[in-house]
Image (cartoon, grey):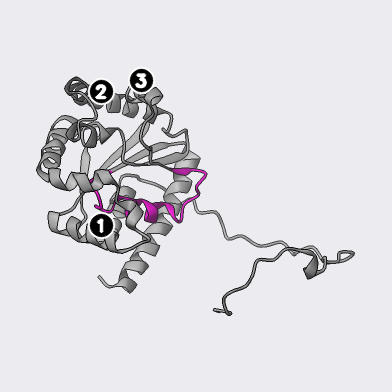
Amino acid sequence: MNKKEYEAELRRLQIELVKLQEWIRQEGLKVVAIFEGRDAAGKGGAIKRITESLNPRYCKVAALGTPTDYVKSQWYFQRYVEHLPAGGEIVLFDRSWYNRAGVEHVMGFCTDAQYREFMRSCPEFERMLVRSGIKLIKYWFSVSDEEQEERFQARINDPAKRWKLSPMDLESRSKWIEYSRAKDAMFLHTDIEEAPWWVVNADLKRNARLNCIRHFLSQFEYADLTPPPIKLPPRQTDENYTRPPIGSQRWIPEHYPDLS
């Protein structure tokens, strides 16, 4: 798929996302989508393409930072519950409570007892969310070792992307197999009928984004509630109004030529 084809299909799907959001808002539905996967698998890029055309008042991204000691003392799921949607909202989790099944377990940030309790309680927690009326969709972005290595190198060599590589990301490279085993165990315990895992082949970023958005749309039987075309009213005339002199205001310097 070339760039022109990709952008045309992305535009078509984003218009459908706008229709879906309006339907979700009017129906008062509560939607949660979880995006998990290895580092540099493309989760953030997919989330960005989903949200960039949607109303941010009703579509939010939850990307939690490192928990404080206070947060660590809470019930584990408590930190995530406060980000769950109200009626008419979509919340996209850029990583989620599955941190405990992945990075926390592999890197030793939780005890074995905490890990086992998560595996036992997570399916029940998710069933509770579904019973409460939340539509829960879980995506795992799968990327090959070779592709991840290439993306890591690209981030290292690009000053604008270098911030995406944390020390934890680099350390995870030495634990590839341990992360694979952790993912397999996670799927075994949490791939439940009420909230199954959906795997996205993420080696090709553009294809992964389009496939993910298309699948997300397919999870709803939504109606097209697009408002009718808007007709702008006539602008008020400038009668009895005089703009202040340009020199009376602080303008930022214009460093660039006209690019139109």
Chain-order first, disc 3 or disc 1: 3
Give amino acid for label 3.
Ser
CB within 8 Å, label 3 to label 2: no
Chain-order first, disc 3 or disc 2: 3
CB within 8 Å, label 2 to label 1: no
Q: Quadrant of the C terminus?
A: bottom right
CB within 8 Å, label 3 to label 1: no
> What separation in Å lies between label 2 and label 1 (alpha carbons)?
30 Å
- Determine which of the numbered discs, if any, sits on residue 124 in the image: 2
Chain-order first, disc 2 or disc 1: 2
| Observer-nearest of 131 and 190 | 190
**Which residue is identified by label 1?**
208
| Observer-nearest of 55 and 147 | 147
| Observer-nearest of 143 and 68 | 68
Q: Which residues are magenta?
A: 36-60
> What separation in Å lies between label 3 and label 2 (alpha carbons)?
21 Å
Q: Quadrant of the N terminus?
A: bottom left
Label 3 residue SS:
loop
Label 1 residue SS:
helix
Task: Say above or below: 47 vs 128.
Answer: below
Q: Residue at x 19, y 44 (%)?
A: 172
Q: Residue furthest right?
A: 240
Q: Residue at x 65, y 66 (%)?
A: 252
